[in-house]
Amino acid sequence: MAIKHATELQYLNHYYEQDGSQLIVFYGQKNMNMTQMLLDFCQGKPSHYYVSRACSEREQLYTWGAELKEKGAFLPEYPAFTDLFYAITEKRTKKKIIVIEEFQNIVKQSTAFMKELISFMHAKWEEQPVMVILCSTLTGWVENSLVSKIGEAAYEITGFVKMKELGFREVTRRFPECSKEYQVETYALLGGNPGLWHYFDETLSVKENICRNILQQDAYLHDEAIRIVGSELRETNVYHTILSAIASGKQKLNDLHIHTGFSRAKISVYLKNLMELELVEKVFSYDSAGRENTQKGVYRISNHLVQFYFRYMYPNASRLKTMQPEDFYETYIAPTFRSFVAPYYVLVCREYLDRLNEKKKLPINYAKIGEWVGKVGTIDILAQDEDGNTICCLCNWEKPMMLYDDYEWLLFCMEKAKLNADHICLFSATRFDEKLILEAKVKKALKLLDLNAI
């Protein structure tokens, strides 16, 4: 089943339909199926696709030239970039797309590339408009280093398009025959990265997929989390230490300092780098009148597979090597797997609310949504409209039944946050107890939603 990236395609088509030439930087994390999406965009349009190598400038020119000569271009053995661009556009067509994948491999080695590309685009402006797409999977480098690297050439960039992770809804479309529980657990493990989804077999259970496709020593996903962390970072020993500490529950700067022995200043620098790469996030609690009860400075691992690796595989690496995957799963993963999935179920519920809000099918049309992180207790989802009307939500994945006591705990957290909710939603992956069901029948502002409802 085709994976949808409708927003990104819409942006690219918007730029393509404009008059003249465009220079687009298109980027996103690895495993987002970026190549396939760009090939889909190019289909039916005049285009040239080049994958740049991690090599010297001279080798890059030789390799690119060899590919073009294979298609009939007349070029010297070691052409200039300008020679390549003119060879690509030798035959006049309607606007031509030139995709250069992993373009950072060129920019990091060549001072001539951007200058020659821009001069070419200006020279061809009237006679042969082009849309050049510079593509990269190094998100941190694009967002933090590209502009300083290319200098004034950055002014020539028409637009930046970032390929975002897909939501839970696309997971359900990828695994349509699987149960909702299977879909949520798969989303918790692999996130919104479609390049990872095809490593899971829908004919196997989630446990079997974990054992066969993650825990097994020769499985591709076994080391993928380490590859993700190491793709843009040096001193991985320091990053692994910090990620392991966060995964074990040490989520505040002081806790990380005590556990690692690193200085707070050093940890802050490394956390900043991890956040730039979207591997870690700093949780900002929803602002409410109960600020004195809010927990500040909480860090979480935001990449799903990296979180799984550092929670289960990294701290038990010796046992992982010496035990059978099924035994390892039962010993180290099964007892806490539902608690691992629980935060991702909150994201699933939030995505559901966002869809309803977009369609104006909620009792309020909220303008802001987040979570309230208290020193004691958390409100999983908190949303308000511009007039202050509020929806508060609690999401249960771990317990076999959501109890009336859970509802009372949410009311306690709301009191600590100094919030009066106009509407309360209780999401449960399982059932609700009878007292809650009766309460919802009496109170119209209280809604109960199980897994099938979303």
Image (spheres, grey):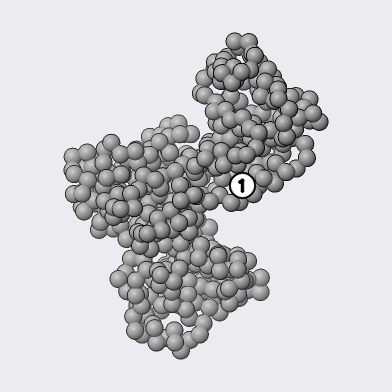
Q: Answer left or right for 159 relative to 186.
A: right
Residue 36 coordinates in the image, percent (x, y): 52, 40
Residue 399 coordinates in the image, percent (x, y): 32, 69
Q: Nearer the viewer, residue 89 or 165?
A: 89
Pick out the residue farthest to the bottom: 442
Residue 236 sits in quarter: top left
Residue 365 coordinates in the image, percent (x, y): 62, 71
Q: Nearer the viewer, residue 164 or 241?
A: 164
Residue 364 coordinates in the image, percent (x, y): 60, 75
Q: Nearer the viewer, residue 148 or 24?
A: 24
Which residue is located at x 35 percent, y 62 percent?
A: 179
- Position of residue 76 relative to residue 171, above or below, is above
Pick out the residue farthest to the right: 126
The quarter of the picture where the C terminus appears is bottom left
Q: Answer left or right for 312 relative to 345.
A: left
Element assignment for label 1: helix
Pick out the residue farthest to the top: 77
Q: Answer left or right for 443 relative to 26.
A: left
Which residue is located at x 53 percent, y 67 percent?
A: 353
Residue 117 sits in quarter: top right
The reply to whether residue 49 is in sight is yes
Which residue is located at x 22 percent, y 45 percent?
A: 325
The reply to whether residue 281 is in sight is no
- Position of residue 212 relative to residue 231, above or below, is below
Residue, disc 1: 9
Q: Amino acid at mark 1?
A: Leu
Around disc 1, counting alpha carbons within 10 Å, would you say few (fewer than 14), some (14 to 19), or many (20 or more)? some
